[in-house]
Amino acid sequence: MLSKRTKYALKALVVLAKRYETGWPMRISQISAEENIPHKFLEAILLELRKQGILGSKLGVNGGYYLLKEPKDIMLSSVIRLTDGPIALTTCVSLNFYERCAECKDEVTCGVRDVMKDARDATLSVLANTSLADIVKRESRLSNPGKAKK
């Protein structure tokens, strides 16, 4: 399950992705109001995303946050790992945060681990191949159901 931190990060990044072509930064207060995200919480999230190289920021009257990469190059799997850590349901199958399960007698023959590995692979198949640009396209399609799928 995604944490509030990750949900808010994704919502904020999608808002910034929609504005990417304009090149204009967006203030925390604007994002907070538009997406109904607590201001202080959002401030901490955006600061972390800036430290991780996903966002840039500009000070001043026309300042705010903006994407450093094109929306098509920011994958959901990367954002989730930065904000929540492992995508896998158990650490023993995590690609980036592996830890052996204390209660496991033999990883090679563990049926639960095998199922969790399949779940991880299916989840990663979607998240590693879905970008912010894809989310923007989906939102556009969902809000205009009469338009043809592209």
Image (cartoon, grey):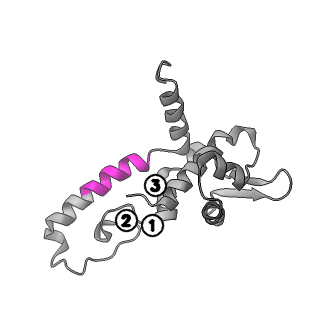
Return the x and y of residue 143 as percentages of the image width and height: 52, 28
Is 145 situated above or below 51?
A: above
Mark 1: which secondary structure? loop
Q: Is residue 120 magenta?
A: yes
Lower position in the chain sequence, tag 1 or tag 2: 1
Residue extending farthest right: 61
**Amino acid type indicated by mark 2:** Leu
**Amino acid type at mark 3:** Ser
Write the residue at 40% across / 65% down.
86
In the picture, the disc for residue 95 is 2
Q: Which mark is residue 150?
A: none
Prevailing secondary structure class for the magenta stretch in the rendered image? helix
Magenta span of residues: 118-129
Q: Nearer the viewer, residue 52 or 140?
A: 140
Q: CA distance from mark 1 to mark 2?
A: 11 Å
Place residue 113 in its image quadrant: bottom left
Q: Nearer the viewer, residue 122 or 44?
A: 44
Q: Are marks 1 and 2 in contact (CB under 8 Å)?
A: no
Circle 1 sits on which residue?
Answer: 85
Where in the figure is residue 53, as x and y percent of width and height?
Answer: 64, 61
**Residue placed at 19% from the left, 72% from the top?**
107
What is the number of the mark on residue 77? 3
Mark 2 or mark 3, which is nearer to you? Answer: 3
Mark 3 packing: few (<14 Cα in 10 Å), some, or many (20+)?
Answer: many
- Left or right, 65 with respect to 97, comes to right
